[in-house]
C-alpha cells in the first residue's frame, strides 16, 4: 500500500512539473534545451529508475511518468518506460492503448534504437494502419538501417496520408535515390529543395538524378553547390572533373581531382575513382611520371581495382609507354632499336616505314635491309598498338606485307595477347610473335 502511495505522489509531482515547464517556455522563459529549468526537470524525471519493477497495479502511475519523459524528450528513458507498459499489457490486455507502442517506437527512433523502434511501430500499425506518424517512423527507421525497399513502402503510405508533408517527401526521395531509383526520386527531391534549397543530401541526390536523365549541365550546377561540403564534396568534385575531362580540359580536371583528394575521410570507392581519373588526366597532359603516384595510391587500398597494375606498368616503363602512346617519330626510333637488337651482328638499314589503322588498332611497319657477309636480306617488324587480342587476320596481313617486300622473316610485337588462330598461323611461317609480356622482356635488351 505504501509503495502505491509513493508512486502516486511521484506521478503527481511529475504531472505538476511538466505543465510548469511547458508554461515557462510558452512565455519565452527559455530559448534552448540547455536552460536550467529544462535540466532540472529532466534530472528529476530521469531519476525515476527501475521501471521494470512496476506491475499492473501501478500501471497508471508509470503511464504518467512515461508521458512526462516523452514530453521532456528523454527518449531513452521514455522508451524504457513504454516498453515496461507494453509488457504489462500482455498481462492485462485492457491496459493497452495504441499510443503506448506508437510513443515507444518514436522514443526508440529518437534514441537511435532502430530495431526496437521498428518492432514497436509495427505493433502500433497492426492496430491502426492509417497513422502518418507510425508509417513515417517506420520509413525513417528502415531508411536509417539501409533497408530502402521497406522504407519506400511505408513512406509512400505516409505521403498518401499527408501528401504535402515535406519531411516525408524528402525522405522518400532520398530512399529512392539510395536504392538506385534516381528518376523516381527526382520529383520528391525537387519538392524538398523548394522548401529547403540548402539541404545538402537533397542537392546531392537530385544532382545524381539529373545526371541519369541526361541533364548534365544542370547536374553540375547542383554539384558545384557542394564543392566544399565535407560529406558530399569529394563525389561532387569527381562528377565535375569527369565532365571537364569530356571537354578535354585536362589541366582544370587535374586541379578539380586534386582538390577533391584533399578532403579527409573520403569513401574508398570515391578515393579510387578520383585517383584513377587524376592519373588519366596527367597522362593526357603527357605528364606520365605524375600518373604513377595516384595509381600506386589506389594499389595500396585495392590492387585489383580496374586495370591499375597494367597502367602502373605502362606509365613506369618508358619503352612500353612509347609503344602505346608515343608519337610516330618516337615509335620509329623504338622500331629501329628493336631491329638492331634482333640482328646485333649485322648491318641494319631502314628501307620502308609505314603507319596504318585497323579497327581499334594502330599498326606501324618497318622494313629493314640486313647485310650479311656476301648477301643481303630483308625483314619486317610490325608494332600493333592495341589493348585487344590480336586476331589471325593481322598476322596474315603481315605475311602478305613480307612477301610484297621480299622479306625472309617477320617479327610482330603487340601490347596485349594473340588469339589461338593467330599463333597457329605464325607457327608454320617465318614469323615470330611477341605478346605484351615477351615484348617487355625483349625491350630490356635494347640499348
Image (tube, rainbow, N blue to C red):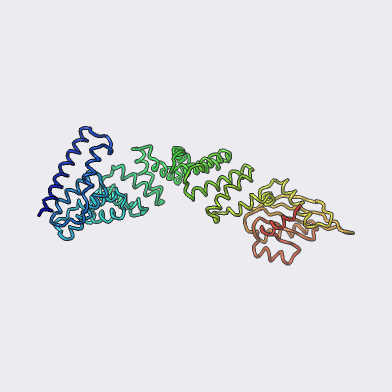
Q: Residue 327 falls in which quadrant of the image?
A: top right
- Going by the image, does 6 lie left or right of 171? left
- Going by the image, does 256 lie left or right of 88? right
- Which of the pair 299/39 is nearer the observer? 39
- Going by the image, does 387 lie left or right of 368? left
Instruction: State the image coordinates of residue 212 (x, y, percent, origin top left).
Output: 45, 46
- Which of the pair 418/404 is nearer the observer? 418
Identify the residue at horizontal 20%, vertical 39% (top origin).
21
- Going by the image, does 33 lie left or right of 222? left
How many numbered discs, if any? 0
Q: Residue furthest left?
A: 1
For the N terminus, the image quarter is bottom left
Residue 334 in sight in this render: yes
Vertical position of residue 377 compared to residue 262: above or below: below
- Which of the pair 55/254 is nearer the observer? 55
Instruction: State the image coordinates of residue 356 (x, y, percent, origin top left).
Output: 70, 50
Q: Residue 22 falls in which quadrant of the image?
A: top left
Instruction: State the image coordinates of residue 222 (x, y, percent, origin top left).
Output: 44, 39
- Which of the pair 422/342 is nearer the observer? 342
Q: Residue furthest top?
A: 28
Residue 130 in sight in this render: no
Instruction: State the image coordinates of residue 160 (x, y, percent, origin top left).
Output: 27, 48
Identify the residue at horizontal 35%, vertical 38% (top origin).
196
Q: Residue furthest front?
A: 2
Amino acid at each position: 500500500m505504501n509503495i502505491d502511495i509513493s508512486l502516486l505522489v511521484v506521478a503527481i509531482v511529475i504531472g505538476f512539473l511538466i505543465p510548469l515547464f511547458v508554461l515557462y517556455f510558452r512565455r519565452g522563459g527559455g530559448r534552448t534545451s540547455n536552460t536550467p529549468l529544462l535540466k532540472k526537470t529532466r534530472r528529476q524525471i530521469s531519476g525515476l529508475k527501475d521501471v521494470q519493477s512496476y506491475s499492473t497495479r501501478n500501471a497508471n502511475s508509470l503511464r504518467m511518468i512515461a508521458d512526462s519523459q516523452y514530453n521532456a524528450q528523454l527518449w531513452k528513458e521514455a522508451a524504457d518506460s513504454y516498453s515496461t507498459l507494453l509488457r504489462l499489457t500482455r498481462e492485462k490486455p485492457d491496459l493497452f492503448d495504441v499510443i503506448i507502442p506508437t510513443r515507444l517506437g518514436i522514443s526508440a527512433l529518437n534514441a537511435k534504437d532502430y530495431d526496437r523502434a521498428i518492432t514497436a511501430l509495427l505493433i502500433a500499425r497492426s492496430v491502426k494502419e492509417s497513422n502518418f506518424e507510425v508509417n513515417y517512423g517506420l520509413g525513417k527507421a528502415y531508411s536509417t538501417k539501409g533497408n530502402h525497399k521497406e522504407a519506400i513502402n511505408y513512406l509512400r503510405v505516409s505521403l498518401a496520408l499527408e501528401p504535402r508533408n515535406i519531411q516525408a517527401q524528402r525522405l522518400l526521395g532520398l530512399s529512392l535515390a539510395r536504392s538506385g531509383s534516381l528518376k523516381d526520386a527526382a520529383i520528391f527531391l525537387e519538392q524538398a529543395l523548394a522548401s529547403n534549397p540548402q539541404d545538402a543530401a537533397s542537392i546531392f541526390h537530385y544532382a545524381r538524378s539529373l545526371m541519369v536523365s541526361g541533364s548534365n549541365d544542370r547536374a553540375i550546377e547542383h554539384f558545384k553547390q557542394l564543392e566544399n561540403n565535407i560529406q558530399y564534396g569529394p563525389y561532387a568534385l569527381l562528377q565535375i572533373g569527369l565532365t571537364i575531362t569530356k571537354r578535354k580540359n585536362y589541366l582544370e580536371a587535374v586541379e578539380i581531382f586534386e582538390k577533391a583528394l584533399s578532403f579527409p575521410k573520403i569513401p574508398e570507392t570515391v578515393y579510387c575513382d578520383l585517383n584513377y581519373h587524376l592519373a588519366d588526366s596527367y597522362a593526357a597532359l603527357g605528364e606520365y611520371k605524375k600518373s604513377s603516384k595516384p595509381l600506386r595510391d589506389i594499389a595500396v587500398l585495392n590492387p585489383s581495382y580496374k586495370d591499375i597494375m597494367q597502367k602502373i606498368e605502362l606509365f613506369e616503363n618508358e619503352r612500353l609507354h612509347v609503344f602505346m602512346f608515343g608519337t610516330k617519330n618516337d615509335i620509329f626510333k623504338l622500331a629501329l632499336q628493336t631491329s638492331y637488337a634482333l640482328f646485333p651482328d649485322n648491318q641494319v638499314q631502314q628501307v620502308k616505314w609505314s603507319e596504318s589503322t585497323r579497327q581499334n588498332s594502330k599498326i606501324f611497319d618497318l622494313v629493314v635491309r640486313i647485310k650479311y657477309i656476301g648477301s643481303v636480306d630483308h625483314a619486317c617488324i610490325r608494332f600493333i598498338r592495341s589493348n585487344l587480342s590480336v586476331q589471325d587476320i593481322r598476322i596474315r596481313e603481315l605475311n602478305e606485307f613480307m612477301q610484297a617486300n621480299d622479306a625472309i622473316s617477320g617479327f610482330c610485337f603487340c601490347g596485349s595477347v594473340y588469339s589461338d588462330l593467330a599463333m597457329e598461323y605464325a607457327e608454320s611461317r617465318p614469323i615470330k610473335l611477341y605478346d605484351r609480356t615477351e615484348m617487355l622482356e625483349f625491350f630490356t635488351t635494347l640499348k
